[in-house]
Image (spheres, rainbow, N blue to C red):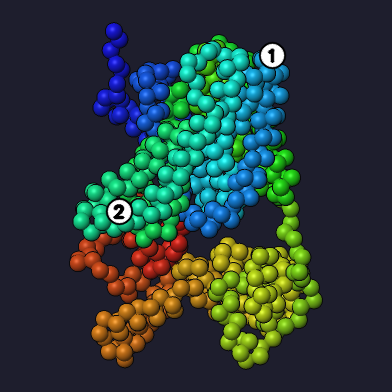
Amino acid sequence: MAEPTGMGLGHAVGLLAVAVVAVPLFKRFGLGAVLGYLAAGLIIGPFGIGMVQDAEAVLHVAELGVVMFLFIIGLEMRPQRLWSLRNDIFGVGAAQVIVCATLLTGAVLAFGLPWYVALIIGSGFALSSTAIVMQILEERNENNETDGQRVISILLFEDLAIVPLLAMVAVLAGVYGTTIENPQPIWMTVGLALAAVAAVYVIGKWALNPAFRILARYGGREVMTAGALLVVLGSAWAMDMGGLSMAMGAFLAGVLLSESSFRNQLEADVEPFRGILLGLFFLSVGMSLDLGVVIQDWRIVLAAVVASMAAKMIGVYGVARIMKAPHDEALKRAALMGEGGEFGFVLYGAALAAGLFDPRTAAIASAVIIVSMAVTPFRVMIADRLKSRQAPSLEGVEEARNLRERVLIIGFGRFAQVVSQPLLARDVDVSIIDHDVEMIQAAGNFGFKVYFGDGSRLDVLRASGAADAETILVCVDKPETADRIVELVKAEFPLTKLFVRAYDRGHSLRLIQAGVEYQIRETFESALKFGEQVLVDLGFNAEDAAETIEDVRRRDAERLTLQMTGGITAGRGLMRGNAVAVTPTPEPYVKPKRESRALNEETAEMMGQDEGEERVQEQA
């Protein structure tokens, strides 16, 4: 009798080690975390160094990561929102599965396989990988965007489609496969699926909220966590018993709890388990790739991967375009969903057990799915590069031409919108230009006339009346763009006054050196007002608080003057710090390579570094 392989502490250490090395490395080169996990799984699996031999056992456990992922997605999707997506779920989703399954079946027939084998392989590959697609959408922060929601809707239908596809395998097995003793009638399969959905709905609708209220009152934090896991795993188990997708059960439970007062608590409890198990899922998929099959039948595998992905991407793109999706959205959807998915393994496993597949066919079909999953990040990267570079539609928007007003405002974001109010209150004639079409259209709804134009171009400045304007207000949010506009105006329209919005202290110094009439750091005055109000709230006299703020303003102005000649570190003695003691050092200040987030944000403005957290970290 063979000894069970099992999973020990050494295996867990090995899995974590390859993940923490491979994932950051792949993300560093823009390949994404998914491909890093897949590569790590291939290295450590039975067809790599062989540290983990039982990839299938790991996969069964790791599928819970996908389950929890879908539960969290469900928590973020209210029932009304899900209902609003019904056309995408049952319309676009059904059309995509049918069209892709038809095209893929035809592609597989070209390899000389029987029609029923081609139908099963094509139908399995038509179901995309929920885990990979959702992970990529989350990494790109697109899961809540409109096109991302459509992709999620299609994935939901594909989860439902596994039921009729498994029933199809059972029917074909009775004619072409091995005889199955006491096969389950199709009506019973459908009945169990409907009963599972009904049970999850009834319990989620009427029992979960009262149960969690009891746990919150009489249980501890660990009991609430146990309850959250019970909800996720229980709903997944119910759906699995009904022959449906476990992920579908978790998603339905999440939707039913999305309006619960315990929603945030549930998400916080499940999130740590989701992240670890989802990473383990991708690792196990990488382990499952049989390199022996790939090497022995590499020509067939390569041809099948290319043919399958091409057929599916054509189907996805075609359905998207027929359903009135723009070219860029259809292209991205085809790239995201051009792979096979986890349910393909389920369908192929059922076909193998029923005698419709031989082991070699099942191994090749599974290898094709895994390879297609592995190259998904590359397809998305290529799709991003192929996006159309069409100019924005200017329907209802006027371009800047022959403007002749007293003041020209360049950039009409939140800063310029406030700046414009005192000018308009005194009936000052202003012209406003911006290059963001959506913002221009939105501003029109609030009574603003904004012209389309890029203020960093000399021809646009001329057309906007820069030569005749008394004052130009540069209110753009990017310092490099503001610098370019200042350079052009100073060179071409030297008599025009420049008032410029500065991003940070360093930008202020550059603007002063460029000779602008006035500059102000965009958050300086609001931060002083904020601090003054805090002092008053803490019990300080209003006059004393105002005097303190005026002292801060004076010190800042003095330091700025010193920095003009002495560099960014000049005038440090004018700053107040919270350190208990400061040890003088002849060495110039050097920012540590890694500072805490709080220190970065608190000192960014005072030290002349960029205020935005991302910009501070980039300079670190």
The picture places residue 548, in percent across and down from the top left corner, at 32, 84
Query: Is residue 466 shown above or below 323?
Result: below
Q: Nearer the viewer, residue 19 or 577?
A: 19
Q: Residue furthest top?
A: 1
**Considering the image in quadrants, where does the N terminus appear?**
top left
Depth order, front residue of 166/533:
166
> At x 72% / y 68%, what residue is drawn?
452
Q: Amino acid at mark 1?
A: Gly
- Marks 2 and 1, how far apart at CA: 57 Å
Q: Name the residue: 40% across, 38% down.
A: 238
From the top left corner, tell me how far across and down residue 311 is, in percent. 69, 30
**Percent x, y of residue 352:** 52, 17
Q: Label 2 belongs to which residue?
A: 211
Compared with 554, 505 (above or below) is: above
Above or below, comparing residue 499 to residue 197 in the picture: below
Q: Residue at x 46, y 40 (%)?
A: 195
Give the residue type at disc 2.
Ala
> Which residue appears farthest toward the right when viewing the image?
402
Q: Does residue 331 sit above or below 339 in this rendering?
A: below
Q: Earlier in the sequence, mark 2 or mark 1?
A: 1
Secondary structure of residue under mark 1: loop
Location of residue 557 by image quarter: bottom left
Determine the secondary structure under disc 2: helix
Q: Position of residue 234 (x, y in %)?
A: 36, 41
Position of residue 287 in the picture relative to residue 86 (left or right): left
* Residue 381 visible in rendering: no
Q: Which residue is mark 1?
A: 112
Q: Nearer the viewer, residue 54 or 422?
A: 54
